[in-house]
Structures are given as structure tokens and as C-alpha cells.
Amino acid sequence: MKTDYLLLVLGMGIVTYLPRWVPLIFLSRRRLPEWLRQWLDFIPAAVLSALILPALVTTGEPRHISVFQPALLVSIPTLIFAWKTRSLAGTVIIGMALFWVAGRFFS
Amino acid sequence: MWNSPYSSYLKEGMAAAWPICLGYAPIGLAFGVLAHNVGLAPWEIGLMSLFVYAGSAQFIAVSMIGGGAAVIPIILTTFTINLRHLLMSSSLAVYLQRLGVGRLSLYAYGVTDESFALNMTRFRGGDWDWRRALALNQTANLAWIVSTIFGGYGGQFIPAGAFGIDYALSAMFICLLVFQIRGGLYVLVAVISGLLAVAFSLLFPGNSYIVTASVTAATLGVFLKKGCGKRRERTEES
């Protein structure tokens, strides 16, 4: 069991590390064509949006749409605050405070 | 910049990591508790956090361990869950030019959703370099390892839901998304990606929706940009 577990975390570590490592090694040492730079430039906005939105509007297993979630409600003023102030610290604190308050009303 | 002492890189990188540490604390504790419940010792939990360092994959691995899954299926699942880091590392590579293989390999270890989002914003701001980014990565890593081990002792050191701490990472992601928006096309790419992600997440199990939605949206963005560029070629300088 102990060696099994060691093999498991080692294997998990390797397959997690490789996708993190390969692009850094192969893309950082050559001049990238303009279209690829542009594409990579869109990736952060695309990835963040793809991470955030499903978490806010879907729930359960199998997933289904659920729009009445405190997290979704809170995300709107949080987004507006981030847009207006452009402050990461402020946004995290306001978001947490609103989520805390919303939790009291919802439960 | 390069003549300032290393300690200032370290300090700046560590200081910038605070929203991630705040967000990792409750998730790490929850993970530790869960792992403890399927019979893992604190050192085993810490070992997984150290070797793997990927929140969602670790959660799924532990639930698979609880379900009695074999080693290979768990490793394969981990691989597919973490494939999305391919995209993030590709995007980061633009800012890590001319680094040696050793430093890149060290950097690769700390690429997570959270460190990627925060470091990309900093790199783009211009006052950031790989040393600070590496300090940020390792600070977040440490917070993750420590909080999962704490959780492994069965402790809920932070009462569930206290101070809205469960929302810290969501708020951070929302703010960093806002920082990434530098024009109408970025809004469009983000909106398309978000909507596709919702659709794909409903259609397919797992988290492949993150990669498929972002790749599709970013590709559309490149084509749209090309289209706009051709139309404006004469009137606008690049």
C-alpha cells in the first residue's frame, strides 16, 4: 500500500508536470509567429472566463444550470467594483464581504 | 533593476501571492479533511501536495482512492484534468524568453490556474520578472502544502464559510479577468469562451470544457482580429 501510494503520487506528479513544462521549454526559445503571439495573448482572458462562468451558473453532478446562487449574485457587484477601481486587493476583500453577507441571507 | 538585492524579489513575489494564499487556505483544509477521511496520513497528504500541486486533480484523486480505484486510472484522470496547463504555460512562455532549461523547469513546477492568472497580469504590467514570479509560485505552493497537511490532522481551523473566504479565489479570478480586457475584442473572446464553457460543461463530464472553450474562443479572436485588421489597414497604424 505504501509503495503503491508512492507510485501513485509520483505518477500523478509526472503527468501534471509535463504539460506545465513542455510549452515553457519549446515556446520560450524561438521567435513565435505573429498569429501565435496574438492567439496566446487571448488565452488568459479566454481561460479565466472559462474557469469562472461555469462555476457561477452550473451546479451538481451531472452538471445542470442553476442561476440562483449567491456566488453568481455577488459576482456582479464584484465585477463592477473590479472594473471601476482596478484594485485586486479591494476586489478580493469586497467580494468576500459580499459573499459572506449574501450567505447569511440565502441560508 | 538587476542590481537590487534578491531579497526584494523574494519580498515582492511573496507579497503579491496573498490573494492566492487566502484562497488556498480553506480549499487546502477541505482537501486535507477529505484525504484524512479516506485514510491518508498527514505526511501522505503533504507528499501529494508537494509532488502534484494541483487542487482539483488532488480532490478527484482522493475521491477515486476512496472509491477503491487503481493507480493507473487515477494517473490518467489526473493527466486529463491538468492538460489545461499546456495553454497556460504556452501563454507564459512569451514572458520567459532566454531563460535556461533549469530555471524554466523550476518555473514549470509552480504553474497553476491561480499563479498563471496573477503572474500574467503582473508580466503584462511590465514591473515583473521570472524571479518575482517564481517567489510568488513558491509562496502559493507553500500555502497549499501547509493548509492541506493542517486539514489532514482533521482540523477545521477556519470555521466553514467564515468571512466569505470561500469566495477569495473567485473574486481574484474576476478581477484578473477584468485586467486582461484591453479592448472590445478581448471582451468578445471572454464572453464567447465563457458561454462555450458553460455549454460544454453541461454536455461533457470532466473539465475538458476549459481547454476546448478557450482554444475555440482565442482562435475566433485571432480570425476576427485579422478581419478587422484588413478592413482598417489603410486608416490605422499598427
Image (cartoon, rainbow, N blue to C red):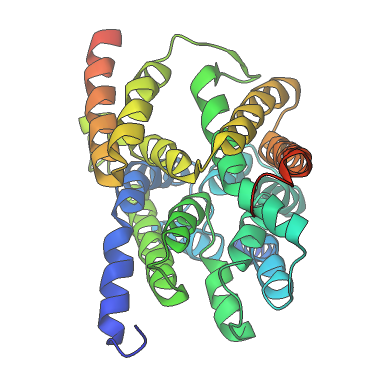
**The one of A42 and B108 positioned closer to us in this rendering:** A42
Q: In this view, does B216 lie above or below B90?
A: above
- Looking at the image, which residue is at 42% across and 35% down? B174
Question: Is B29 left or right of A101, judged from the image as shown?
Answer: right
Question: Is A84 left or right of B131, judged from the image as shown?
Answer: left
Residue B108 location (% of width, % of height)? 58, 69
Q: Is residue A3 above or below residue A104?
A: below
- Looking at the image, which residue is at 32% across and 77% down? B9
Residue B19 location (% of width, % of height)? 32, 49
Most extreme residue toward the front, as rendered? B235
Looking at the image, can residue B154 be seen? no
Query: How many numbered marks, from 0 up?
Result: 0
- Looking at the image, which residue is at 30% across and 9% down? A106
Q: In this view, does B167 lie above or below B182?
A: above
**The one of A28 and B71 positioned closer to us in this rendering:** A28
**The one of A20 and A4 positioned closer to us in this rendering:** A20
**The one of B80 and A19 positioned closer to us in this rendering:** A19
Quarter of the image for residue A90 reads top left
Residue B83 location (% of width, % of height)? 70, 51
Residue B93 location (% of width, % of height)? 62, 67
> Quadrant of the image for the C terminus of chain B?
bottom right
> Quadrant of the image for the N terminus of chain B?
bottom left
Quarter of the image for residue B134 reads bottom left
Looking at the image, can residue B54 be seen? yes
- Looking at the image, which residue is at 53% across and 72% down? B107
